[in-house]
Image (cartoon, rainbow, N blue to C red):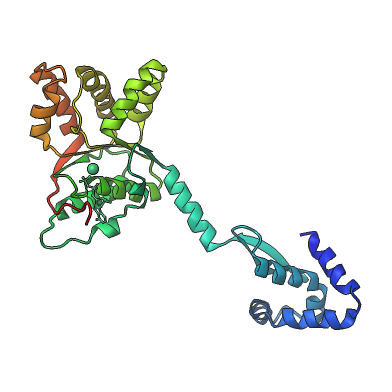
Amino acid sequence: MEDIGKELEKVFSKGNYKQTYDAIVIEIMQDPDVKKFILENNDKINDKIIQNSFSKLYEFFIEKEKNQFNGYEPILFLNRNFIDVEYRPTEEFLLKQREQEKNNRIKAIEMPKDIKSASLSDFQIINEKDDRSQAFEESLQFIQSYTKNPSEYNKGLYLYGSFGVGKTYLLGAIANTLAKKGTNVTLAHFPSFVVAIKQSISDNTLTEKLNKIKQSEILMLDDIGADSMSAWIRDEVLGVILQYRMQEQLPTFFSSNFNMTQLEEDYLRISNKGDDEPLKAKRIMERIKYLSKEVPMIGINRRNS
Ligand code: ADP
Ligand code: MG
């Protein structure tokens, strides 16, 4: 701001002092925002106030043009007996900031990048061949009841259906909607999360990783059932996460190509070593059922469409 005075001096020291000064005054007084401000404060402003405030009007005029205050715009206001300038964040800046805050509330583990732009309003486009309305309705219902009463237990959703129907997209859209309302959401691509968990054994971050994920306000495990799983991951990782979330009543979502019965029989029951453990599978499945409501998603494959 100190530069304004210097700039003025520079202008006036060029000679033609009076002429230049008058030209600037005219230009500033013709600025639509200056005009509007003076008109709006007509009853409080007189010529003397305008004269005394000229350096501030000049500052306003220059800063408005330069738009140099990244994200801030100058605003005129009446400060007792002279006109002053203050700086306020622009609409655009506030929008960007809100978007940033929203994104900070979403922790995405190995999820597609475009998930942060998934939105429920885009999801509504449903054609006749495409019945995903139940999933959509259930999503809205969850959001409504969770936002209204976050401390009450809100069951998550278990979205299942074939490849490409938009399960991951819908999880992302729910996550974005919740994050905009101030909720923290962790979205993890389950098979990749498992890989990261296995790696964390060697660098001693297993407990930390496990704690973080199990404690997240809302957890979404995407694509469960897509890999083959070891008994250790099933019982000591997935089992531990689900047990904790049940105890603490934390909302948990799943997406899978399998429905709940298939997940139990074809995924949880047989370990990657070929051991058949129906009781252990059942125990995990009971937790999943406690945490989430099974919702089918039937529709066209949206990949490459
Ligand atoms: P799934 O997880 O069921 O396999 P995805 O969520 O990955 O399916 O969706 C497949 C593709 O279609 C993705 O590229 C996704 O971004 C896109 N998609 C899904 N639903 C919508 C939608 N309602 N609007 C726009 N794009 C969508
Ligand atoms: Mg998916």
Nearest the viewer among 93 and 80 is 93
Nearest the viewer among 75 and 259 is 259
How far across and down, in percent of the image, does residue 68 sit? Answer: 66, 61
How far across and down, in percent of the image, does residue 168 sit? Answer: 25, 45
Would you identify the image quadrant in which residue 260 lies?
Answer: top left
How far across and down, in percent of the image, does residue 16 sit? Answer: 90, 81
Lateral position of residue 251 relative to residue 53, left or right? left
Q: Residue at x 19, y 33 (%)?
A: 226
Lateral position of residue 19 relative to residue 128, left or right? right
Q: Residue at x 12, y 32 (%)?
A: 263
Placement of the C terminus among the 4 image quadrants: bottom left
Q: Quadrant of ligand 2?
A: top left
* Residue 106 is at least partly visible in this image: yes
In the image, residue 259 above or below residue 126 = above
Lateral position of residue 59 relative to residue 12, left or right? left
Q: Residue at x 16, y 55 (%)?
A: 133
Q: How many marks?
A: 0
Q: Residue furthest front?
A: 304
